[in-house]
Image (cartoon, rainbow, N blue to C red):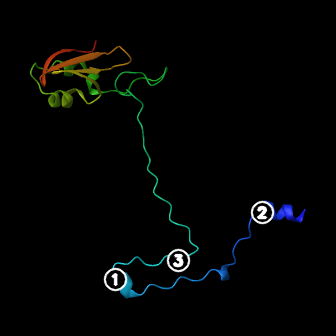
Amino acid sequence: MLELEKALRGPAAPVASAIPAAPAASPASTAAGAAPASTSGLAPKPAKKIVVVEEEAYSRSGCSPGLFQSIPYAKWMDSELWLELEKGMRPEAVESLLGPEHYDTAAGDNLKWEYGRCGARSDAQLLFNQGKLADWRAPAK
């Protein structure tokens, strides 16, 4: 029974006096760029954890995040802003007006932005041809 208890406890912890002390680094060696000697018996410092926050896909674009939750307000939902669009506008100007919550599809010189895309459906669309706004469909009021 005594051997079973020893096996369950694992190896005995080392005695503190059995660990030799690390020699102190001389000022000349640390000034020359050498790393100071580490103290034996100390655990290494844990690496920093990187926290990644992922926003739910299309959470501000029109797909409802839940059955009983409303979609957060986004600039593109304001139908009055769509009246300020003009043919020939650059994508940067349109994005500053309507916001960045668009889904992009490119084909050749054409670029289609869809606001409020949820599956195959979208609430509003813009079409750019050769980098200029060519046509759009505003969201329903």
Q: Judge left or right: residue 4 versus residue 39.
A: right
The local secondary structure at tag 3 comes to loop
The structure residue drawn at horizontal position 50% and vertical position 65%, both measured from the top left corner, is 45
Q: Amino acid at mark 2?
A: Arg
Q: Which mark is residue 119?
A: none
The structure residue drawn at horizontal position 67% and vertical position 83%, both measured from the top left corner, is 17
Residue 73 is drawn in which quadrant?
Answer: top left
Q: CB atoms at circles 1 and 3 under 8 Å apart?
A: no
Q: Amino acid at mark 1?
A: Ala
75 or 127, which lies in front? 127
Q: Judge left or right: residue 4 versus residue 20.
A: right
Q: Residues within 10 Å of mark 2 (few under 14, many from 20)?
A: few
The structure residue drawn at horizontal position 44% and vertical position 50%, both measured from the top left corner, is 50
**Residue annotated with mark 3:** 39
Q: Amino acid at mark 3?
A: Thr
**Residue annotated with mark 2:** 9
Q: Residues within 10 Å of mark 3 (few under 14, many from 20)?
A: few
Q: How far apart are the two marked residues, 2 and 1, measured between alpha carbons?
A: 46 Å
Residue 36 is drawn in which quadrant?
Answer: bottom left
| Of callouts 3 and 2, the N-terminal one | 2
Task: Name above or below for residue 111 compared with residue 53.
Answer: above
Pinpoint residue 70: horizontal percent, then vertical percent.
42, 23
| Of callouts 2 and 1, the N-terminal one | 2
Q: How far apart are the two marked residues, 1 and 3, measured between alpha carbons?
A: 19 Å
**Residue annotated with mark 1:** 31
